[in-house]
Amino acid sequence: MYTEPPSPASQRRRQCAAATAASAAACLAPVVVFLAVLVLAPSLIPRLLLRPHHDIVPRVASAELRLMSFDATASALVYNLSAVLQFDGPPVLYARRYTGVRAAPFYAGQELGAAVALPEFAQRRGGGGGATLPVAWAGVQRVTPGRRARSVAAALARERAQGWISVKVAVRAAQDGEESDFACSLSFPVPRKRDGNGSGATPAVFDGGSCADTVRGEF
């Protein structure tokens, strides 16, 4: 069947219509982008530009060391300590939630037991919130016999002779799902034995200090 080709005038009209549509799309594109930015900016700007890496950095408000000794026969550290972790920070532009909060003590690179899970908490918009979380650890931690055990025993003997025992508390918290690790360095005077029958010891007190960001992998 024969189809008559379009006339030159019809072709010009089609070309004109296509050009008009392309021109309209080119004009509307910036308007659409502007409207999208206008709608999304209030939520994106605080998150992308003004959000600090960590809104809250923990600190140790206080801590007590009741016992830290090395049992050479069992190749184990015997420990008893507690701390009060304080989570507070500057005012924020939007509420933040902290989950998966855990803390574990280390001595001479040796973890003392498993990390303790702590309650979740939130920081309200504009300030306020945060948390003060007490935590305690006590028990016997076996140390691999040989070089590792000798290293830990030597570190403890050296620090006892110097009069101070250093313990690190590793803290992990997820800020709106983004995990961060912190290291809290604590220095205690050597616990003194009580008068009388000599059982137990007077707790050594740490007056508090800040924690620092650290690399992942302590837990």
Image (tube, helix red, strand yellow):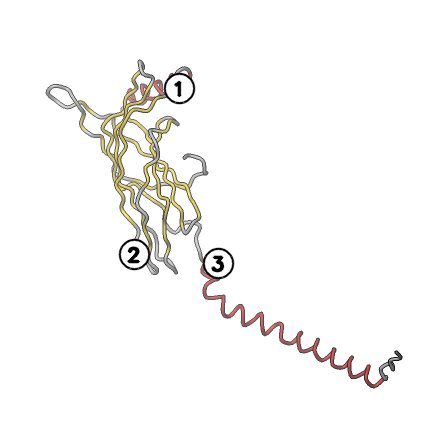
Q: Nearer the viewer, mark 3 or mark 1?
A: 1
Report the side of 197 relative to 91 (left or right). left
Furthest toward the left, the residue is 196
44 in relation to 82, above or below = below
- Numbered marks: total: 3
Mark closer to the chain start, 1 or 2? 2
Report the side of 112 relative to 45 (left or right). left
- Percent coordinates x, y for residue 19 in the rendering: 74, 78
Residue linked to disc 1: 144
Label annotation for residue 128 = 2
48 in relation to 177, above or below = below
Contact? badges 3 and 1 (CB < 8 Å): no
Amino acid type, label 1: Thr
SS class, disc 3: helix
Contact? badges 1 and 2 (CB < 8 Å): no
Mark closer to the chain start, 3 or 2? 3
Label annotation for residue 49 = 3
Furthest toward the front, the residue is 1
33 in relation to 157, above or below = below
CA distance separating discs 3 and 2:
22 Å
Amino acid type, label 2: Gly
Give residue 60's quadrant in the image: top left
SS class, disc 2: loop
- Percent coordinates x, y for residue 59 in the rendering: 32, 43
Q: Quadrant of the N terminus?
A: bottom right
